[in-house]
Image: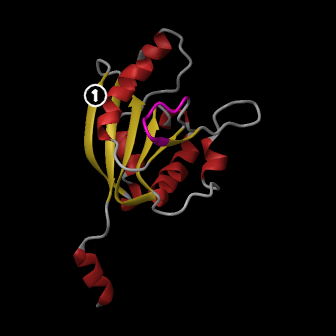
């Protein structure tokens, strides 16, 4: 049920070539899915994702559905930067993540899930270095989860003028 709910909020926002990172069963239609695991079968996006043979600017959309909060904190920036690298100009990074309230609910029911991320924490992670800009975000699943859409922007024209002077 949770997976269907997540896909229901993500699917209308995908277009063109889609890379689904941490895809599990790869349920996004017409996408290229990457499910990276270590030798013990545990998700291992960090050590492998930066070494994939994916050309720069190959995808219109990069999805991290219920994935970011499973990535160790020290590796999240690397994954976001790699998503930026593989996205085309004006591409979209779509993320779903448990909110802090959702994380608390998971802990109360003793489900093994990492702490949720607040809107502030998510923006701080993804918008750092000016790589992305938040264009859409909404809670879903009764506020236990949130969907974020970040846009990959090219520098403004004024930036080119400033560089040339």
Give the position of the C terminus as an image quadrant: bottom left
* Quarter of the image where one finds residue 72: top right
Instruction: Pick whichever, 114 or 90, lies toward us.
Output: 90
Magenta stretch: includes residue 26: yes
Residue underneath mark 1 = 139
The reply, left or right, for residue 46 in relation to residue 29 is right
Regarding residue 109, the answer to whether it shows in the image is: yes
Asked if the stretch drawn in magenta spans residue 156, the answer is no
Asked if residue 26 lies left or right of residue 143, the reply is: right
The magenta stretch is 25-31
Q: Residue at x 57, y 46 (%)?
A: 74
Residue toward you, 112 or 51: 51
Return the x and y of residue 151 as percentages of the image width and height: 31, 53
Image-quadrant location for residue 154: bottom left
Residue placed furthest toward the left: 158
Say left or right for 13 vs 66: left
Seen from this angle, which residue lies furthest front? 30
Nearest the eye: 34 or 136: 34
Residue 36: x and y, percent?
A: 63, 39
Residue 99 visible in the displayed image: no
Q: In the image, residue 9 lies at what x, y percent? A: 31, 30
């Amino acid at each position: 049920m949770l997976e269907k709910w997540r896909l229901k909020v993500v699917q209308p926002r995908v277009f063109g070539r889609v890379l689904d990172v941490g895809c599990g069963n790869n349920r996004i239609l017409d996408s290229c899915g990457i499910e990276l695991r270590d030798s013990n079968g545990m998700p291992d996006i960090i050590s492998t994702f930066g070494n994939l043979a994916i050309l720069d600017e190959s995808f219109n959309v990069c999805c991290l559905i219920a994935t970011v909060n499973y990535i160790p904190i020290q590796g999240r920036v690397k994954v976001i930067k790699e998503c930026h690298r593989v996205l085309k100009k004006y591409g979209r990074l779509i993320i779903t993540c448990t909110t802090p309230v959702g994380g608390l609910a998971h802990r109360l029911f003793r489900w093994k899930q990492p702490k949720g991320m607040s809107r502030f924490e998510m923006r701080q992670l993804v918008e750092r270095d000016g790589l992305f800009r938040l264009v859409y975000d909404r809670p879903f699943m009764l506020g236990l989860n949130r969907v974020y859409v970040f846009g990959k922007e090219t520098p403004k024209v004024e930036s080119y003028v400033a560089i040339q002077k």
